[in-house]
Amino acid sequence: MKLFLDDQRVPSNVAIRMDHGTFLKEPWKIVKNYNEFVDYVSNNEMPEIISFDHDLTAEHYKYAFAESIPYGSLNDKTGYHCLLWLILFCEKAKVKLPEIFIHTQNIEGAENMKNLIDVYKQIK
């Protein structure tokens, strides 16, 4: 199973931009926010692939071109928060982190998420 986190798009919407046939293959489970993400991962088998959007609510869109994102002061959790939760979940459960794609259009958010993965891999 593949898991797709995005508040608006579906996997076929990002397939061309990502230039990756994986997004056209089914099945994908789509979740739209932090709570759905946590619920799905907590109550199902770990997906083989997870693709992350960063901006999951209108509040996040104003940071789409920002140089920094104030994660601690946001009312709603972003894809970055979901990824952080996933890393901690995998570590606690002693489960391998699945293959990760980041399909967000938020440049700073994507960079933050890639850095989070890099740091995790360095300490593993």
Image (cartoon, grey):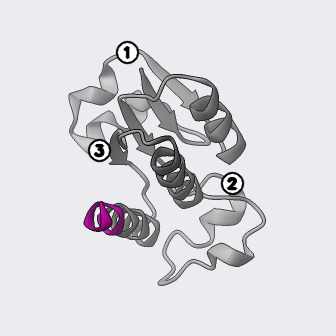
Number of marks present in the image shown: 3
Where does the image place residue 61, in percent across and percent down from the top left?
61, 64
CA neighbours of label 3 inside 10 A, class few (<14), some (14 to 19), many (20+): few
State which quarter of the image contains the C terminus: bottom left
Of labels 3 and 2, earlier in sequence is 3
Which of the image's four quarters has the N terminus?
top left
Asked if residue 101 shows in the view, the reply is: yes
Q: Which label is found at residue 107?
A: none
Q: Amino acid at mark 3?
A: Arg
- Residue under numbered circle 2: 57
Going 27% across and 37% down the picture, which residue do you hit? Answer: 16
Measured Cα–Cα span from mark 3 to mark 1: 18 Å
Task: Please say whether residue 54 is one of the residues in the magenta stretch.
Answer: no
Above or below, 105 against 8 in this view is: below
Is residue 32 visible in this depiction of the protein?
no
What residue lies at 55% left-to-right and 54% top-to-bottom?
Answer: 79
According to the image, label 1 marks what residue?
Answer: 26
Tell me the amino acid under the disc marked 2: Thr
Seen from this angle, which residue lies furthest top? 26
Residue range corresponding to the magenta coloring: 118-124
Residue tagged by mark 3?
17
Secondary structure of residue under mark 2:
loop
Residue extending furthest toward the right: 75
Query: In the image, what residue occupies the spot 38% across and 48% down?
Result: 103
Query: Tag 1's secondary structure?
Result: loop
Q: Residues within 10 Å of mark 2 (few under 14, many from 20)?
A: some
Horizontal arrangement in the rendering, residue 67 relative to residue 121 (left or right): right
Q: Position of residue 10 (x, y in %)?
A: 49, 31
